[in-house]
Amino acid sequence: MKLFFLFITLPLFVQNNLSAIENDISYDHVSVFEIKAKNEGFSLNSKTEISIKHLSKRSTDISYYFIPEPFYSSVYKLAAKLGEKRLGKSTFSFTYPKSKDVFLQDGKIHILNLPRKIKQGEQLFYSYRKSYSDLTFLPIIKIPNLDYLNSYKIIIKHPSDVKPEFSFFLPAGDVEYTIKPVGKKQTELIFSKIDKRRSLPYFPFNGMHAAVLVKLMRGQSLINSASPESFMEWYGKQISLTPSLALDSESALSAAIPIAENDLSKLRLIHDYVRENVRYIADTRAMGAFIPRQPDITLGRLYGDCKDKAYAISAIARNYDIKVNMALVSTEPDYSFKNDIHITQFNHVICQYNDGENDIFFDPTAKYCEFGNLPDGDIGTHAFILDPDGYRYAKITKPNNLPGIELIVDAEMDSLIRAKATITLRNDYLGDAVRALNELKKIDLENYLSNLITSHFYKISVDYFSLIEQRQDAIIFQATADLSKFLISSKTKTYIPRTPFTVFDNQILEREKDDYSIYLDNAFRAKFILNLKADGFSGKATDTQIGTTNLAGLNVSVTPEKDSFKITYDVNIENKIYHDKNKKLFIEFCKSYYTNKTNLIALERSSQ
Amino acid sequence: MKNSRIYLCLIFLVFLGCTTSKRIIYMKKPTDVANTGLDIDDFIEKYEDYDGVYLSINETIEHSGTKQGAGEPWKYVRIRQIKYMVLNPDNERLTTLKLSASEAADFESIYSRVTYPDGTIKEYDSSNYIMEENSGSRIYKFIYPNIVKGTIIEEGNSVSYNAWAPRPPLEHDIPLQFNIPCLSVKFKYAYPDWWHINYKKIAKYRNYPFGIEKDEKNHKRIITVSAQNVGAIKNELYTPAFKELANYFQFMITSLQMNGTSYYAPSSWSKVASTFEKYAMKKGGGVAGFFSDPTKEAKTMTENLIVGCKNNIERAYKIVEAVQKSFEIIDDLEVNDLKKVFENKKGNIYKITGITQLLLDYAGINSKFCLVHSAKDGYFDETYIQYSQMNIPAVMAEIDGEHHFFFPYIKYLSPGHIPEHLLSETAIMFADKKSKRSTAANRFIRPTKMIKLPDETQSNNKVVEHYDLTIAEDGLIKVKEKKILTGYMSYYIRKELDDLKKDEYDKVIRSFLTYDEGNVELISHKVSNLDSSTKELILELEYTIDNLVTVTPEEVIFQTGGLFSPISLKKYKVSSKDRENPIRVYYDESYEKQISIKFPFYWSLSETPEQVELKNDFGAITANFELSDTSKLKVSQSRFLKRCSEPKERFSEMLEIIGNSSKLSVPTLFFTVNPSN
């Protein structure tokens, strides 16, 4: 049975005296973290108890629960009870999770396999303990967005000279909580009775109400690396931040570097070598999830993950007295804790170099991204630069403001199906196209390129590609464009859309009603120039601006020329994230964009 | 002294009666240079479309042990040796090793050898590999270093098992085609010569060719199967199931004896059926025959369900739908009686089918429990009697002289709809309850009969869409959309809407809006017959769109957007000359759209779009436009794709139907404005 609330079924529910909205579960969670002084440091252990009452029928379809065991912890004393019955050890199994990005790892997942179907109204209780290898790994605690969260308790037992403080990330506004000291050796943080928050489009935090970072203070000092300073200190103990590696003197790279023009040219050579020759395979065993392998190992076996590559580049560069640092970034929307930091906030490592004036970032993991440019996922993030001379944060800005797609179409009114198109692809589109050229053939390649372009344009299709030029920073194709549906002709006029791009769907307009940020998958910059030979047509020069160019905007200019028109469209969605006032402006742009769909450019047929 | 003589005689007798099939096959590590005779550059060019090429695959399974009593314990070993060239070093699967086996396995030997294009060779063994231990299994992993295009990797492993844990498979299905090309594949199966094997035909008069060697000394028979220059499997639209196309070798053990244990495969389909019968139809402990003791609740349920039904088809559909809704499917291998299943409202697919057959019986409908063969298992060889060939349960009901087939454990599947992989397939039907069992030996065997399922589904597979548009003089459009779905489409949407909360449900409903560009204001929505798989599923949506119509003083432009055809011109080209697989369309696919557009009376349509009609052996597309009065345009569009099975050479004709939906599109309508009207 499902719960659905059509008006035709509502009477049925009223009749049966059911509440209009039934929660799926009632969820209670208690995690007790115990910090004890040990030798010259501290030990960290936890006990977690979870109780779930299955209220709705559909919640009884669940047949297993997961308990993660990351590499920095050990899980033990797993126990479970279903209804009144204690479940045996055979209820639990474990596996190494299969990950798209990681081939080797230590982390496990324990699986609680329910031996039978849960009954509606029945309670499941399970618990486990964890010991952690380092206080740094005291995790960020995510308060889940469930239907329904009855209570979530974090209890920290600590020495009397240690005081926990909490830092909160609240993506969807305030959430009520209580902080309660219990004597000198225990502090509790409690969330209770929180309803499920509705899922929103363009919002990546639908799964949680809050993220909590726990800082452990002893006097004025932080003991668990939750500040940038302490994190740098901790990280610097794990690995040298000034690696150096001398290349094999017979290698082509070691011959090329000394004769390169300047430091940037040298870095380009090193970067290109690593991105082209070191294949991406992640081995995150032991501390490999956070700490790179030694550069001689990475270059010796020619595989590694992002941090292995970045570290190897840093080491090679340093050998030539060029200072390149690793920079930690998050390519996904990240939670931020003002001045605090946690190692798990970052999921990617790139390189940073300062030329005396500016920070230059480069990403050797992006195989087809040229030196000096960055894949879209890195742009807009805040990088934490692991500079041994002093950490700092830097916002990664766009290396260039060039359009990712530039489409120039030369068309004639009486031959709109076969217009000549020249397509220039840059940035991520360049990478996608080069990958497709390398990995796809024939019809698959044609389809890929066609859809790469066509998916961004309204009623324009592009086919029959031939490669004209391939450079480091761009790739140019010639193709055939079909504009027969794009241009609209009546007996007296031809109309051309003012909004040719498909940039977002109308779910975005739902976001007008809330106060939270909008998160897009990508920023977007494109240019479309239509050179239309149109004998016997007349039209006015116009210039239309929708939105604002430097935030989110579209500019359309129409320039009549002799027997032809040049229509230039330039769209720029500058950011991936829009907050506060910028969010309002972005929504206004979207609304205006949709409204301008009917604001067509009209070319009048001259009377005979 | 006398006792020891007796003992010696006994021992002598025991061993005299022992027949032993000793192990004869052991893995040999390759010693030759891997790229001998290979022109790597030529190879790379020839196979540039692929990430890699198998140069050879050799697999051997050998069983060894003693026929009776003590002696050599029964063991089996699996040896696999592959050799392939890497053409895309970024392909993780081809440049890493991953070998898994149960924790009971004994890894006798594992090796890898990497030969680089420059001739350098590196060798690895288990001391280099990383081992992951999951519950009940082990996985060896390794990342090959320095892989470049043209590198050849060889892997070999020999894994043996004590045959008592885990028990060895008694049937083998050996693929002889893969997702990358393969120059040579060889499979060997070595077994004791007192065992018996049966081989499955892959087509009516065709076995996959194989050879048999005899080793009398070691009491061994060795089957060998091989293939050369095997092309890669290609995924294409409208293609038959893999085993209907690809090469494979399938065989089973029909009898074996080892260390005093015997096994005999069922010798008839009736015996296969009887094995399933005890899961599906046994009631209570020790009571043979399910029909003789029906449950009171089942009778009551039937009586309640069929109230008001006018005929047997209605009764049958009501019953099947009720079972779909009321019973939960669980993986349940217990031999359990149906009464308990009925009470708990849960059971495996066999029991649910058994329950349904019981209910139909009580409704007075002649019905039989069936087990169906699937097209996914390739050709049905009647002489290859094996459980895996017939393991999909169904109920056959005879109504008004016609056979109807139901799958009551597939929730939301329209009764009468037959999944595509079962169309035209053979089924075992359990015979009448009153049939006599001929002999004492057969007294536990349920008689059966072979039948064929229909070659077309009994329910419609159709989508009909109605659009009523009203355009106001300011350009605002009000749309009333109604979608009527039957068959597989209704099944998918019911599944998608199953068990959703309100906000999830609303989100899914919005995704059904045909037009989603612009500020669409959803006024109302309604879904009818969501819970009733016997009826059409009806989705009704009412909404307004404010940015499709441009009103100028002289004329009005209506950009129809997705109302006539999809907005996005995203498409996938398919090339008929590159087509490799034959064509199979399992169901008739019918799609109809009825559109009515009402506009202000003082507008007039500038030009009525042209009719479209195209027909060929694969189906038809049509579009008709008609001005029904001065301010209403009626449009009807249809696309019909016929169920068929055709050779690949006819794909270009099929493209005329599936590739030309854009012929139905009318991107813009123009109206002239005559205020004087």
Image (cartoon, helix red, strand yellow):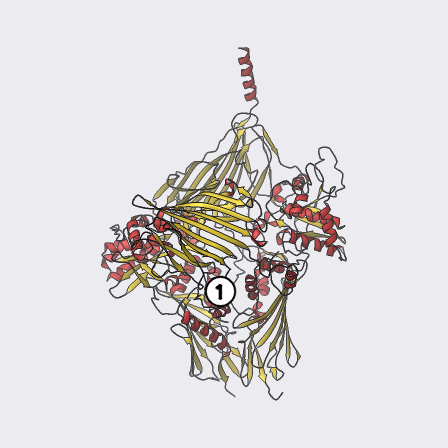
Chain bearing mark 1: A
Amino acid under disc 1: Pro
Q: Name the image quarter holding residue A6.
A: bottom right
Q: Residue furthest top?
A: B1
Residue A408 in view: no
Q: Residues within 10 Å of mark 1 (few under 14, many from 20)?
A: some
A411 above or below B267?
below
Residue B44 falls left or right of residue B394: left
Q: Position of residue A101 (x, y in %)?
A: 42, 53
Q: Is residue B225 left or right of B460 when viewed as pictured?
A: left
Residue A509 visible in rendering:
yes
Say which quadrant the C terminus of chain B sits in.
bottom right
SS type, badge 1: loop
The spot of residue A139 in percent (x, y) is 39, 52
Residue A491, compared with residue A194, is above or below; it is below
Residue receiving disc 1: A201
Front one among B468 and B442: B468
Q: Position of residue B264 (x, y in %)?
A: 62, 34
Depth check: A329 or B247 in front?
A329
Q: Nearer the viewer, residue A79 or B289?
A: A79
Residue A330 in picture, x, y percent from top left: 38, 59
Q: What is the quadrant of residue B317 in the picture?
A: bottom right
Is A380 on the left-hand or right-hand side of B200?
Answer: left
**Up/down of A169 relative to A287, above or below:** below
Q: Nearer the viewer, residue B409 or B636?
A: B409
